[in-house]
Amino acid sequence: MDIKKTGDGVMGINETGDGVMDINETGDGVMGINETGDGVMVISKTGDGVMVISETNDGVMIISETGDGVMVISETNDGVMIISETGDGVMVIKEIGDGVMLISETGDGLMVIDETGDGVMVISEKSDGVMGINETGDGVMDINETGDGVMDIKETGDGVMDINETGDGVMGINETGDGVMGINEIVDGVMVI
């Protein structure tokens, strides 16, 4: 093991053997910790709070913080998971494996949840309160809310049922199957059963 201090606060710790470790602090608070061996880990801090933690092995994990709070956590293995926060609260979570799940929040509160597997489910919220829930599998169900209170619920399967509410109080319920039933309510108090 070597400890060396040179110049203005420059310090180096070098340990070489089965596991190699380096700690280097130079100049204005720049610090690096490098450990290479069976599991490679790097911690480096440079400039204004820039920090990187990377571990590459059977499960690869990277935590990096650069600039203004930019953080990335990625784990790639049988199940791939990525958590990245960049800029103004942009966050992405991706898990890919037997059940694939994606949660991404970008810009002004945009959120998407995608889970694809035996049953595929999508929850997306975009723009001004626009929300969609789509589940496709044995029974397909869609819930879509767009604009000013416009809501659609559609379930298709053994028994198909539709609930559509659009505009000013217009509601329709249609169930078709062994027994067909329709309920329609129209704006000016006209109701059909």
Image (cartoon, helix red, strand yellow):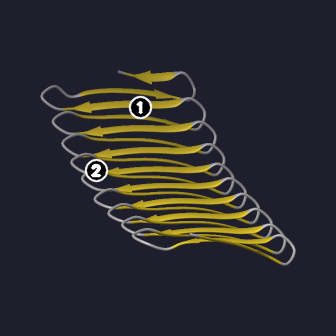
Element at label 1: strand
Hey, what amino acid is under mark 2?
Gly
Q: Quick one: which residue is furthest to the right in this view?
A: 8
* Quadrant of the image containing the N terminus: bottom right
C-alpha separation, residue under disc 2 versus residue under disc 1: 35 Å
Reading the image, the residue beneath label 2 is 99
Residue 166 in picture, x, y percent from top left = 53, 38
Pick whichever, 89 or 73, lies toward us. Answer: 73
Q: Residue furthest bottom?
A: 7
Location of residue 111 with respect to 19 vertically, above or below? above
Q: Residue at x 87, y 74 (%)?
A: 8
Name the element at disc 2.
loop
Query: Toward the viewer: 100 or 15?
Result: 15
Q: Which residue is painted at 32% across and 63% down in the image?
A: 58
Q: Amino acid at mark 1?
A: Gly
Quarter of the figure with residue 188:
top right
Q: Do the residues under discs 2 and 1 have CB atoms within 8 angstroms?
A: no
Disc 2: CA contacts within 10 A as few (<14), some (14-19) or many (>=20): some
88 left or right of 191?
right
Measured from the top left, where is residue 157 in percent x and y? Answer: 20, 39
Give the residue number, with chain letter if any, for mark 1. 172
Quadrant where the C terminus is found in the figure = top left
